[in-house]
Amino acid sequence: MGRRSLIPGCHLHGRTAQRVGLQKAQGEAQMKWLQRLWDWIDSRDIDKHVLSVGIFYGTVKLSSWAMAFAMLHADKPGIEIAAIIAAVTAPYMALQAAAISFYFKARTP
């Protein structure tokens, strides 16, 4: 006579079925905890603030790089330096515009 599974429709037996059930319960508990954490973060707009602080930090770093680059290459023509700085900073300016737009759209009720 074959062994019967503890979970209907499952081909696992005995302790294996119990382990699978325990793992499923632990996974569900972790998901509930993650859901509560995300709801807490979302209700306080922490994600939006972290994003804007990160973008601002990148702006400061990029601006300090541009100033240092311009000072270190003062022997080159100004238009050359300006073109290099613009080529490096232009993609980041697009990111800034998108992030600021997202931030203010998310803050309006």
Image (cartoon, grey):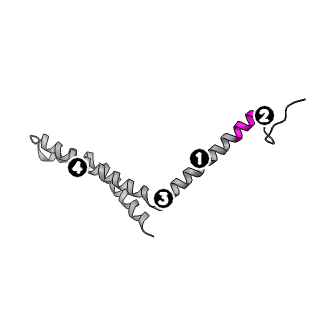
Q: Nearer the viewer, mark 3 or mark 1?
A: 1
Q: Quadrant of residue 107?
A: bottom left
- Asked whether the residues under the numbered discs 2 and 1 touch, taking CB atoms below 8 Å apart as contact, a structural biologist would say no
Q: Amino acid at mark 2?
A: Gly
Pick the residue in front: 12 or 98: 12
Question: Label 3: how many residues lie within 10 Å, few (<14), some (14-19) or many (20+)?
Answer: few
N-terminal label among 3 and 2: 2
Q: Amino acid at mark 3?
A: Asp
Any mark on residue 42, and which?
A: 3
Any mark on residue 63, and which?
A: 4
Residue labelled with disc 2: 14
Gap in angstroms between the C-alphas marked 2 and 4: 64 Å
Gap in angstroms between the C-alphas marked 3 and 2: 42 Å
Q: Position of residue 54 (x, y in %)?
A: 34, 51
Residue labelled with disc 1: 30
Q: Position of residue 16 (x, y in %)?
A: 73, 33
Gap in angstroms between the C-alphas marked 4 and 3: 31 Å
Gap in angstroms between the C-alphas marked 3 and 1: 18 Å
- Asked whether the residues under the numbered discs 2 and 4 touch, taking CB atoms below 8 Å apart as contact, a structural biologist would say no
N-terminal label among 4 and 3: 3
Q: Position of residue 15 (x, y in %)?
A: 75, 33
Residue with the most extreme left position: 75
SS assignment at label 4:
helix
Question: Label 2: how many residues lie within 10 Å, few (<14), some (14-19) or many (20+)?
Answer: few
Gap in angstroms between the C-alphas marked 2 and 1: 25 Å
Q: Amino acid at mark 4?
A: Ser
Q: Which residues are magenta?
A: 10-21
N-terminal label among 3 and 1: 1
